[in-house]
Image (cartoon, grey):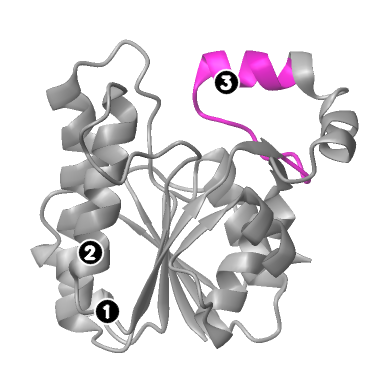
Amino acid sequence: MNILIFGATGMIGQGVLRECLVDPDVVSVQTVGRSPIDTQNPKLREIVHTDPLDYTAIEANLRGFDACFFCLGVSSAGMSEPDYERVTYEFTMAAAQTLVRLNAAMTFVYVSGAGTDSSEAGRSMWARVKGKTENALLRLPFKAAYMFRPAGIQPMHGERSKTAAYRAAYIVTKPLLPLLRRFFPDYIVTTEELGRAMIRVARTGSPKKILESSDIRDLGR
């Protein structure tokens, strides 16, 4: 498979990229992001692209992919709804609408979050925006589209969040995560499981279009 990854510099994206690079079924990986990544591998090609709303300049490099793993996202903390919607909805849809036009047989996997509001009418701002994004993606004519909704995520190979508050939280909770995972296995997935689950749905599909943490864990084993 030829895989395209958006958001490979974030914690989730770092883990997903690693699993793609070690999987023998993945022939090539291309990342697209606004900043360079710190990884070198014969399978890997990197594109630094600074305009997440317009991919016209790099369209020639976005063809021929079997799957896209869209790991780009930000915390809603301190953001207004229009600003959060711009990053979460508009950035995602700009990429997805370009890719579905260029790769009709592509599988698109979007990293959403536990508690996302599919009705788009709930009280939680971030959940409404995530729900709007999921619904719009599921309407696009991809070969298949899957919404991943992880709750807690345990980094396994030194992956680090770009958000300072999240980094601090992970430092504090790191010793507890294995214990929490033991007692709450349906809520915490590892970055390994997340990446492997994405590769599996790209390879063989899934009966569910929206996958919660327990589904991701089962697919990623």
Image quadrant in which you'd find residue 6: bottom left
Residue 196 spot, x, y in % from top left: 67, 67
- For the residue pair 139 and 25, the one nearer the viewer reads as 139
Q: Which residue is mark 1?
A: 142
Q: Which residue is mark 2?
A: 96
Residue shown at 67%/40% (left/top)?
159
Placement of 220 over or under 92, stated as above or below: below
* Local crowd size for mark 1, using a 10 Å CA cut-off: few (<14), some (14–19), many (≥20): many
Amino acid on which the number 2 mark rests in the picture: Ala
* Local crowd size for mark 2, using a 10 Å CA cut-off: few (<14), some (14–19), many (≥20): many
- Judged left or right of residue 90, residue 206 is right
What's the CA distance linking mark 2 and mark 3? 27 Å
Decide which of tag 3 and tag 1 comes sooner along the chain: 1
Amino acid on which the number 1 mark rests in the picture: Phe
Badge 1 marks a residue whose secondary structure is loop
Q: Are marks 1 and 2 in contact (CB under 8 Å)?
A: yes
What's the CA distance linking mark 1 and mark 2? 9 Å
Residue 165 spot, x, y in % from top left: 54, 13
Placement of 71 over or under 129, stated as above or below: below
* Local crowd size for mark 3, using a 10 Å CA cut-off: few (<14), some (14–19), many (≥20): some
Instruction: Please tell me the numbered disc located at residue 166.
Output: 3
Residue 19 spot, x, y in % from top left: 67, 64
Q: Are marks 2 and 3 in contact (CB under 8 Å)?
A: no
Residue shown at 49%/70% (left/top)?
208
Placement of 182 over or under 169, stated as above or below: below
Decide which of tag 1 and tag 2 comes sooner along the chain: 2
* Residue range highlighted in magenta: 155-171
